């Protein structure tokens, strides 16, 4: 499954069904640059959940709505509801294990 991108106009549609890993990032953020390729790999290798990215610089109100304090901020949503969250870089195996373990 490919990475998807969201903003305030389409976020509800992107996260409303199934399990979603929501990544808040910025282009200038070092750890975000590190996790970006990892999330691309996860997206290509995994059909159990989709990955949606939100640029915090372009979507400040959306980042505030989710209570983003630092980036990268990762949220697991199930049918549109946040069920868990973490911040910072994570290796690929840890991301997949974490998202799959959340119900």
Image (cartoon, helix red, strand yellow):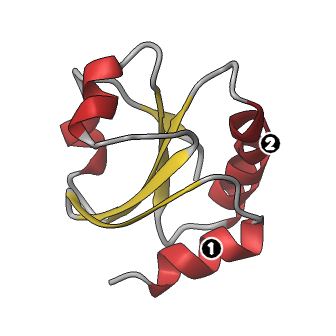
| Disc nearer the start of the sequence (1/2) | 2
The answer to whether 9 appears left or right of 27 in the picture is left
Q: Label 2, on which residue? A: 34
**Residue located 21% across and 63% down the image:** 79
- On screen, residue 46 above or below 25: below
- Helix, strand or loop status at disc 2: helix
Q: Quadrant of residue 44?
A: bottom right
Q: Quadrant of the C terminus?
A: bottom left
In front here: 68 or 33?
68
The answer to whether 79 appears left or right of 2 in the picture is left
Calculate the distance from the C-alpha at mark 1 to the C-alpha at mark 2.
16 Å
How many numbered discs? 2
The residue lying furthest to the top in this view is 58
Residue 96, numbered label:
1
- Helix, strand or loop status at disc 1: helix
**Residue located 73% across and 47% down the image:** 35
Rendered location of residue 28, percent (x, y):
70, 19
Rendered location of residue 64, percent (x, y):
27, 31
Q: Quadrant of residue 13?
A: top left
- On screen, residue 98 above or below 70: below
Rendered location of residue 55, percent (x, y):
49, 24
- On screen, residue 58 above or below 35: above
In front here: 45 or 29?
29
Rendered location of residue 38, percent (x, y):
76, 52
In front here: 60 or 19?
60
Task: For label 1, count other residues whose C-alpha is less than 10 Å away and answer few (under 14), some (14-19) or many (20+).
Answer: some
Residue 75, numbered label:
none
């Amino acid at each position: 499954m490919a990475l998807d991108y969201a903003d305030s106009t389409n976020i509800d549609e992107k996260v409303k069904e199934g399990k979603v890993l929501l990544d808040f990032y910025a282009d200038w953020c070092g750890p975000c640059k590190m996790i970006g390729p990892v999330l691309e790999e996860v997206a290509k290798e995994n059909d159990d959940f989709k990955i949606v990215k939100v640029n915090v610089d372009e979507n400040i109100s959306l980042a505030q709505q989710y209570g983003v304090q630092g980036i990268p901020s990762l949220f697991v949503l199930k049918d549109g509801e946040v069920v868990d969250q973490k911040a910072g870089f994570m290796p690929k195996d840890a991301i997949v294990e974490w998202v799959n373990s959340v119900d």
